[in-house]
Amino acid sequence: MAIEKFTKLTSGGVPVNIENIDTDQIIPARFLKAVERQGFGDNLFRDWRYDKAGEPVASFPLNDPKYKGKILFAGKNFGCGSSREHAAWALYDYGFRVVVSSFFADIFRNNALNCGLLPLRVSEKFLADAFATIAADPAAQFEVDLEAQTIVNLTTGAKEAFEIDGYKKECLMNGYDDVDYLLSIRPEIEAYEQKNA
């Protein structure tokens, strides 16, 4: 799956206001049979999106047509649990490009960045205000500017800066995974090898 370049995104938000969402809730273990990144989005939050008969749970935000967008707002401690990269793959494959939370598990955060998904950490106040904004207006828009490292609630004007590793920022902005990045600097690598042969 190719990684999309990411510079700036203006989008609605999908609220899943639950804390401690672990990777097994994001993508249950029984769906981890594939080794490619594609196809996992169909089973994102499978046990919350569908009942035991396989029918959509109307009250779950991903099944509610009033919530649309490429930004998932989630409760504190998102992506805890096992280290499976499939959790990040499922979110990206479903169509999310940003996950906003007040805290991420470290391994999930790294897996997300490696597949082109931006895990954006904000203060608990900003997150609570975002949930309130979406509850009042499900069509509310948010702007994520990766170059400036800011997120803005376009309804309230609230703005926060976020941190990101410089290397991962460059990869996201160029649509690179680690191999793509190495290929992008191949001339410099070859020049170094020739100089130091």
Image (cartoon, grey):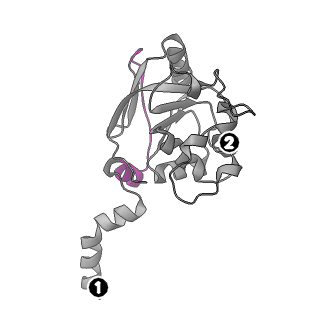
Residue at 40% in and 27% down = 11
Q: Position of residue 164 (x, y in %)?
A: 44, 45
Q: Which range is magenta? A: 154-172
Q: Is residue 182 above or below residue 14?
A: below
Q: What residue type is disc 1 on?
A: Asn
The residue tagged 2 is 22
* Local SS, label 2: loop
The residue tagged 1 is 196
Q: Is residue 120 left or right of residue 105?
A: left
Residue at 52% in and 26% down = 14
Whether the residues at callouts 1 and 2 have beta carbons within 8 Å, the answer is: no
Numbered tag placed on residue 1 in the rendering: none
Closer to the chain start, of discs 1 and 2, is: 2
Q: Is residue 163 left or right of residue 174?
A: right
Q: Position of residue 65 (x, y in %)?
A: 51, 21
Q: Is residue 10 left or right of residue 93?
A: left
Q: Position of residue 33 (x, y in %)?
A: 64, 57
Residue 153 lies in what quarter of the image?
top left
Classify mark 2: residues with Cα within 10 Å, few (<14), some (14-19) or many (20+).
some
Q: What residue type is disc 2 on?
A: Asp
